[in-house]
Amino acid sequence: MIISKELFTKNVKDFNIDLKDVEIEMFDKYAQMLIDCNKKFNLTAIKEPDEIVLKHFVDSLSIMNTVEFCEGQTLIDVGTGAGFPGIPLLIMNPQLDITFLDSTGKKLIFIESVLDELSLFGETLNSRAEEVGQNPDYRESFDFATARAVSELRNIAEFCLPLVKKGGTFIAMKGSKVEEEIAQSENALKTLGGKIENNFKFELPSCGERSIIHIKKISQTPTKYPRNFSQITKHPIR
């Protein structure tokens, strides 16, 4: 086993998660595949087993301290990269129907290999979020959207909220000092049909403060959104 069982179990207990041995084994296989594949293709800058546990696995599972997932609910993981937070959530909640969305095909091939190795089921979607948000097959069809984003909240909200059905939730995973972003996003969220419901703050060991922002979809998103990438980034909704 390449990951520390003690480190992992100790740090998820803060989120009221008790890991079973079979789940730890699945995470260990995932970590090994991530390290092996990272030697050939840059999936993540986080390469050490302990860092993978804390900065990827524990961080991803922190969502479970803020929401209780139910059988058959749908979730789209926007800009999933190497599968975060989607794969950790799926390991712990195999009843979820998760779609992994990324514009880089090689990352989705990696995710498919992990799903196959762990006998998990999920859909991969090789596209840009703003294109999927205008696709009637996916638009406003998910109970949840997740994103671990470095982009401003008002921008990532335009990528994600159009994918969430009315009554659903966009879960934005952010770092510390999000108050200014939240203030700047107020009009954008209102325009897109969303409203901040909660901002959960916690300390991630060795990594500092994190925020998990729940944005409730209270009305339909106007059809003009999402706009194309350059419009979103150069001219954010104000």
Image (spheres, grey):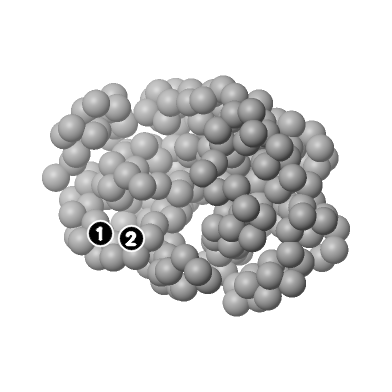
Give the mark nearer the N terminus: 1 vs 2. Answer: 1
Please indicate, yes or no, whether residue 104 appears anywhere in the rendered image: yes
Residue 86: % across, % down: 60, 46
Residue type at mark 1 is Ile
Report x, y in % for residue 16.
65, 75
- Foreground residue, 174 or 29? 29
Out of 185 and 104, give the one closest to the viewer.
Answer: 104
Residue found at the very far right of the displayed protein: 22
Determine contact: label 1, label 2, CB under 8 Å: yes
- Which residue is painted at 56% across and 36% down in the image? 43
Left or right, 54 with respect to 149, comes to: right
Identify the residue shown where x is 29% and y is 32%.
Answer: 225
- Is 28 left, or right, of 199 in this rendering? right
What residue is pinned by disc 2? 196
Residue 201 occupies quadrant: bottom left
Instruction: Give the image location of residue 148, x and y in percent.
Output: 45, 49
Mark 1 sits on what residue?
182
**In the rendered view, would you say 18 is above or below 138?**
below
Name the residue: 28% across, 24% down: 228
